[in-house]
Image (cartoon, grey):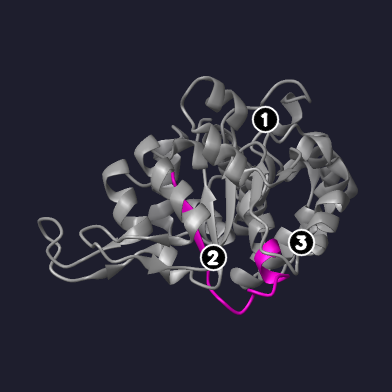
Amino acid sequence: MKHIFQYIEAISKTSTTVLLTGETGTGKELVAQAIHQTSTRSQKPFVAINCGAIPSDLMERELFGHEKGSFTGANQKAMGKLEYANDGTIFLDEIATLPQHLQVKLLRVIQERSFEPVGSLISVKVDVRFIAAANVNLLNEVKECRFREDLYYRLNVLPIEIPPLRERREDIPLLVRHYISEYGKKYNKRIAGITDKAMDVLTKHSWFGNVRELQNLSEMLVVLATEGSKIDEDFLPETLFKSNVNEPAGTYEEVMKAFEKEYLIKVLQETNWNRTEASKKMGFHRNTLQNKMREHGLKEAH
């Protein structure tokens, strides 16, 4: 990560195109934002587009905009994200999912710094910095003819690979404390911190969901923690103790569902299964607690 910070500092005064690679959840968009914020374009827009989240038939209009009447329902002219990002930075996440016909158009924008909105014959000039990100090997995608070779080399001017969290475990305590502090402020809840034993469990966990998984778990811990408490080892999901560096503990949803069930049982046992008292302790409405108990199949005889 120190090398990455050095790269960011080195390119801060340039408009070099950057290609970020790494597993899902490693923080590629955060790195892209850091590149933008330290650049001379920092006062201009930073526009992020998840290429994999937008249907291919809408992506062209999302990028380039359209003229009034250019298609059914186009009742007015609309500016595309490329034009909106003029003088700033555009971040294209999951670039490997971009349809090939749009890869051709994107290549032209990078080369000529101009494009035509959908339904227009007039070119729009733009000055944007391109940062692309991929969670797959783009060179393999090129070899399999799923990604254009010429676009790959246009994007791969400055490649930065972001390592998975399990390969930079020294970052975990810093991230955990940061997220607990941030979510404590967000939910107006005072958390006394986290014990060394609990931190040791988190540091040894594989984190196949990377920083995003850690962030989501930190939020859940803060939401479910008692006011003024310190997060201890027995407060963590059981699945964290079962995983190791070679084997994922399950999906984020599975981990969180198991964690919530364990937490409900723990608080209900502490309150002798008094639903009113337990719901107050957890900050839930009594009906919410009953719904969660029903969802997890929990009865007093558990």
Please provide the residue range marked out in magenta: 34-51
Secondary structure type for disc 3: loop
Q: Residue at (81%, 47%) from the top-left corner?
A: 172
Cα gap from disc 1 to disc 2, whole angstroms: 45 Å
Residue type at numbered disc 3: Ile
Determine which quarter of the picture holds residue 182.
bottom right
Q: Residue at (51%, 42%) from the top-left corner?
A: 94
Q: Earlier in the sequence, mark 2 or mark 3?
A: 3
Q: Residue at (70%, 70%) from the top-left corner?
A: 39
Secondary structure type for disc 1: helix
Residue type at numbered disc 1: Thr
On screen, 122 above or below 294? Answer: below
Query: Taking the image as drawn, is residue 295 in sight?
Result: yes
Would you name the residue on which mark 3 appears? 11
Q: In this rendering, which labeled residue sits more in front, label 1 or label 2?
A: 2
Neighbor class of circle 1 (other Cα within 10 Å; few <14, some 14-19, many 20+) is: some
For the image, the number of numbered tags is 3
Would you name the residue on which mark 1 appears? 239
> Left or right: 267 with respect to 233?
left
| Residue 259, position as x, y percentages in the image | 60, 39
Secondary structure type for disc 2: loop
Residue type at numbered disc 2: Val
Would you name the residue on which mark 2 appears? 128
